[in-house]
Image (tube, rainbow, N blue to C red):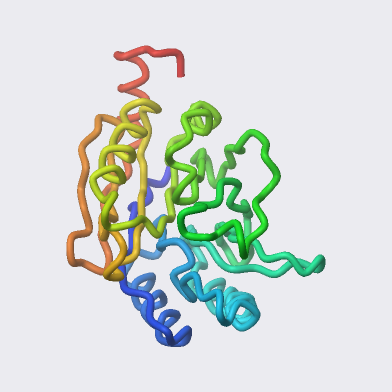
Amino acid sequence: MEQRPLCTLQFESTDSYENNLKQLLEGIEQTPANAVVLAPEVCLTGFDYTHFEAAAQFSATATDALLKVAKTRIVALTLVEKKETGEFFNVAKVLHEGKVVHEQPKNRLFKLGDEHTYFTQGEEKKLPLFEIEGIKFGLLICFELRFKKYWQDLEGADIILVPARWGKTRADNFKVLTEALAVMNQCYVMAADASNEECSSMSRIVSPFGKSTANGNALCLCVAYDQQEIRQMRRYLDVGI
């Protein structure tokens, strides 16, 4: 099986949607052509509730540009999306080979940030695993990381993606939870957060053994993916996964 590099992106989202898209595309283009790339939650628009219609429209347009650079990469991020019902959702999209191969709405909205006032939450149900070219993925959007039932839903994933916009005052929580998730589920965890002043800037990639490598000040971090390490962890420390 092809060994795909794992790459997390971290940058500051500005008031300019176009500038944010430019930063995102630059980050993606820094990654190997076969990489798994994760961007922060709503990195193109932020939670721009004042211009929610415009944010949703831009997200739809930007998806076309992102599909063109995804190609052989696997690219994941979340976008503000308006449905035909008029409701707004925070939707994770995974792009590969010119199409959206997985979509997942945010089920747990962060009330301290008033997300529930503007977004509709996804249907409460078991989170799915999805497979791309032999790799099993799971996905948690930011606040969902705190819910232990979701950790159980994603047992068996090779890689868990965590796009986030995590508060700076809870930065240590983000580090601890992502590392614990990797150790508990014996898998890789890719966590991408924004570097805005109010955010944790704690983007990182954690191995199944719990080794954590952080982006620091770098736009792009890449770590080798080793599926054999997942098998070894599950064989020698058998917890039923």
Position above or below: 90 against 181: below
Q: Quadrant of residue 176?
A: top left
The quadrant of the picture occupied by the N terminus is top left
Q: Position of residue 220 (x, y in %)?
A: 27, 65
Residue 179 appears in the figure? yes
In percent of the image, x 60 and y 37: which residue is there? 127
Q: How many marks?
A: 0
Instruction: Name the side, left or right, on which 98 lies relative to 15.
Output: right
Instruction: Name the side, left or right, on which 123 lies relative to 150.
Output: right
In percent of the image, x 65 and y 68: which residue is there? 81
Position above or below: 240 against 165: above
Q: Nearer the viewer, residue 25 or 112?
A: 112
Q: Nearer the viewer, residue 59 or 53?
A: 53
Q: Quadrant of residue 34?
A: bottom left
Q: Position of residue 153 (x, y in %)?
A: 55, 30
Q: Position of residue 119 (x, y in %)?
A: 63, 61
In percent of the image, x 18 and y 60: which residue is there? 216
Position above or below: 29 against 114: below
Q: Position of residue 169 (x, y in %)?
A: 26, 54
In percent of the image, x 28 and y 41: which residue is there? 206
Q: Nearer the viewer, residue 5 or 165?
A: 165
Q: Nearer the viewer, residue 153 or 188?
A: 153
Residue 64 appears in the figure? no
